[in-house]
Every structure is written in structure tokens, then in C-alpha cells.
Amino acid sequence: MRRPLLGRLGLRRRHDGSTHIRPGGALVLCVVVWLVCAATVLESAWLLGIDGWRFAVLPAAVSAAVWALLWAPRVVVHEESIEVRNVLETRLLPMASIDRVRLGAMLRLELLPAPGSDKSQVITAWNAPGVGRDRPRERLAAMDTRSRSNAAAARPDWAQRLRRDQLESPSYAAVEAWERWEARHEPASQDTGAPAATHSRRLNTGVIAVLALAALALVARAVL
């Protein structure tokens, strides 16, 4: 299925075989904000010279926040694992540790229970595009009595619309990758003697450092 423009912007396949997933709208917003901030910084430097740094701190901090909140977080799909990069931490989830991948309003990955436990863990990729809850064009068509009478039989039901929206979402690449892996390894999954796969977790020290520097710059601008 051919995805909308923003869906294609949010899906990037790299030469190493990985697929990077972000919201397409977030990419557009990042570019717009960065261009405005860069223009503000250049104008301050042009008019005030070195003293223009006071007016450059806020645009620089805004650019750093947009990068940390909208650009850096993403989902990276590999052949044998899915990497969920949220703002403060990154989870590396081997396919063997995933029990189910759910795509609704958000992308959620349910992990298999740890050995000796019956409680599963759910990892939410908060910056991955989900399925839209509302479509204004369809809502207006439903309110139009003429459209309702003429196209009632042609309109898909709720399950069909959900399936269509899932297929159009860039995050469906994660669902597809997990389903392909599961299909390849289904016979091996019956082997209860195989060791359980474990996922790893690490802090995003680079993102935290950038946010800390931006906060310090704002404090220094307010004090000096």
C-alpha cells in the first residue's frame, strides 16, 4: 500500500538494512524550527556582533530541545532486533524477547515474561507514529445525509479502517519485521529448552548532555 507523504517522510531505510521510523510531521516541524532559529541567530550576529550572543541563546536552546524531543527519538528496526530510542533511554529488544507488537494510537511492544515470572513488560515508543483517531474528511461525509445514503455500503467498517490505517502508518514496518521473524522461527519457538532472550537498556547520555547544556545556557543568559 502506498503511504501518504508524511508517512513516507517518517520511514527511512538505511544501507545497513535497518529501517528508521519517526513521525513525518515531526521532521517537517524540526526543519522549520531550525531554519527560524538559525535566521534569528544570524540576524543577531549581523546586527550586534559578539554581543548578539544574548539573543542567540534562546533559539539555540529551542533547537536543542526540538532535536532531543522530536529528532533523536525513533524506532530502529533490524533483522534480529528492534531498537526503541525514547528521550532519556534506549531499549534494544531482540526479536526473540518480543511476544507481540501492537500498533494503535501508539506503537507498543509486549515482551515475554522473564524466567520465573508470569508478568510481561510493555515498551512504548512514544515518538513512533501511530494510527490516527480521527479523519475529518470521513467525519464530514458521515454527517452529510446524502453521502450517508449513497455510500453507506461502500464505506469500510471500523475493523477495515483500522487495518487500512495500520498499513499506511510508518510504524507498521516494525510489525512486519516482527511477523517475518516469527514466521521464520516458529518451529524453533516450540523448543522450551532454548535460553530466553534478554533485552538491554541504556541511558541516552548524549541527549541528556545536550539538554543540560541548553538549560545551563538559559540560566547563564538570565544571570549575566
Image (spheres, rainbow, N blue to C red):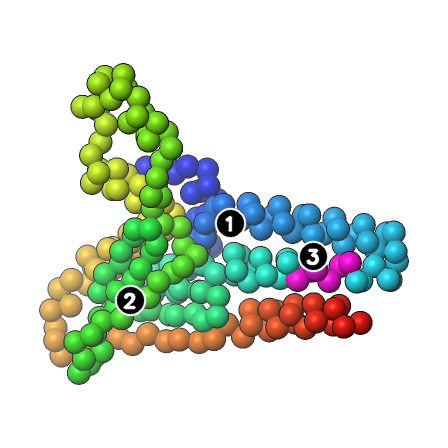
Q: State the quadrant of the C terminus.
A: bottom right
- Local crowd at mark 2 within 10 Å, few (<14), some, or many (≥20)? some
Magenta-highlighted residues? 55-61
Give the labeled residue for mark 3.
Answer: 59
Marks 1 and 2, the one that precedes in the sequence: 1
Q: Camera-side residue: 31 or 51? A: 51
- Local crowd at mark 1 within 10 Å, few (<14), some, or many (≥20)? many
The amino acid pointed to by label 1 is Ala
The amino acid pointed to by label 3 is Pro
Q: Camera-side residue: 114 or 96? A: 114
Give the labeled residue for mark 1.
Answer: 26
> Under tag 1, what secondary structure?
helix
Task: Examine the residues drawn in magenta and state their main secondary structure.
Answer: helix
Query: What is the x, y in percent for residue 47?
Result: 87, 51
Give the labeled residue for mark 2.
Answer: 122
Residue drawn at (45%, 53%), measured in percent from left and top?
A: 22
Q: 68 above or below 3?
A: below
Residue drawn at (56%, 47%), measured in percent from left and top?
A: 29
Query: What is the x, y in percent for residue 106?
Result: 34, 54
Q: Camera-side residue: 215 or 170? A: 215
